[in-house]
Amino acid sequence: MDKLNQQPSPNFPSRAARIALYPGTFDPITNGHLDIIRRGLYVFEKIMVIVAVNVTKTPLFTLEERCSLIQECFRDFNDRVEVDYTSGLIVDYAVEHNISAIIRGLRAISDFDYEFQLALMNRKLVPSVETVFLMTGFEWIYISSSGIKNAARLKGNVSGLVPSHVEEALKRKFS
């Protein structure tokens, strides 16, 4: 029998994923992140942006501030984008909320190595949750949250790299 015609394993969802998680620390959210979310909405009906608590990082913005900054970006998306947070494993969050896909953005080959390892670990932990990689748009390949924070800290112009309300929040943090 052709492998493509075989029934999926019992752990595999019986229908295509309608909701995907897009996790990250989003400290702060950038136009590159927004690009991934907007393009993800062509594939999924809804995206849950999950602000992850990463104990190895010291964020500039509080968890509440990061969630609020993200929510402000998607006020007009008719509930197709939701924001939540977790301090646990993303795959555990996916299982708890019956979500079978995680979106990860890729900028460069260096991202791929890390993201590939993470996807394999997630698959080992919960085989029914798939990782979907989306390439960042060309105009955003060079930006990162840490690079934007460093530029803003040194009074560099980050307009066009982050939404305007995020740019204002950065200015307030570094004033």
Image (cartoon, helix red, strand yellow):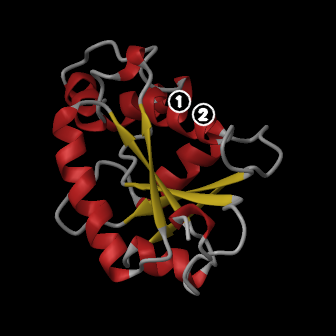
Nearer to me, 135 or 71: 135
Using the image, determine if residue 43 lies above or below residue 88: above
Residue type, numbered disc 2: Arg
Q: How many marks?
A: 2
Marking on residue 39: 2
**Picture residue at 19% right of the left edge, 51% below the top:** 114
Spatial separation of the CA atoms under disc 1 and disc 2 = 6 Å
Q: Secondary structure at mark 1?
A: helix
Look at the picture and state if 108 lies above or below 49.
Answer: above
Q: Which residue type carries mark 1?
A: Asp
Pick the quarter of the image with the C terminus.
top left
Dots 1, 2 in contact, CB < 8 A: yes
Q: Which residue is at 45% across, 81% downward?
A: 92
Between 8 and 167, the one nearer to me in the picture: 8
Taking 80 as reference, is 62 left or right? left
In this view, 165 is above or below 61: above
User: Disc 1 vs disc 2: which is toward the camera?
Assistant: 2
- Determine the secondary structure under disc 2: helix
Estimate the x, y position of residue 58 in percent, counting from the top left.
Answer: 21, 57
Q: Residue at x 42, y 77 (%)?
A: 127
Q: Is residue 157 left or right of residue 133?
A: left
Image mark for residue 35: 1
